[in-house]
Image (tube, helix red, strand yellow):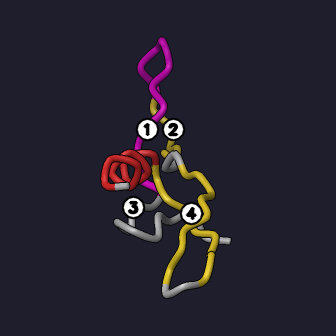
């Protein structure tokens, strides 16, 4: 199961973990995904959306 928002396409991003001694090591920032049931073309489907898109969906409903 991919960690990608099905509405906006937001996926994992990369960056650095910076320690107290300012040494850097690679890390991943994962999107805040939620599983939501949405009615699409008359059928109920489960999609994974990020919290930003979830906020937009609730505002439009």
Residue 41 percent location from the top left of the image: 49, 87
Residue 6 percent location from the top left of the image: 46, 70
**Residue drawn at 54 percent across, 85 percent down:** 42
Query: Which secondary structure, mark 3?
Result: loop
4 vs 2, front mark: 4
2 vs 3, front mark: 3
Q: Mark 1 Cα within 10 Å, few/some/many (few <14, many 20+)? A: few
Residue 43 percent location from the top left of the image: 60, 83
Q: CA distance from mark 4 to mark 3?
A: 11 Å
**Which image quarter: residue 10?**
bottom left
Asked whether residue 41 is in view, the answer is yes
Q: Which residue is mark 2?
A: 25
Residue 9 located left or right of residue 46: left
Query: Which secondary structure, mark 2?
Result: strand
Query: Which secondary structure, mark 1?
Result: strand
Q: CA distance from mark 2 to mark 1?
A: 5 Å
**Residue drawn at 51 percent across, 38 percent down:** 25
Asked if disc 1 and disc 3 are in contact, CB closer than 8 Å, the reply is: no
């Amino acid at each position: 199961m991919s960690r990608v928002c099905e509405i906006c396409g937001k996926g994992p991003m990369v960056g650095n973990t910076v320690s107290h001694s300012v040494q850097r090591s690679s890390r991943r920032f994962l999107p805040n995904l939620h599983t939501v049931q949405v009615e699409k073309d008359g059928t109920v489907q489960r999609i994974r959306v990020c919290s930003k898109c979830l906020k937009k969906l609730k505002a439009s409903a």
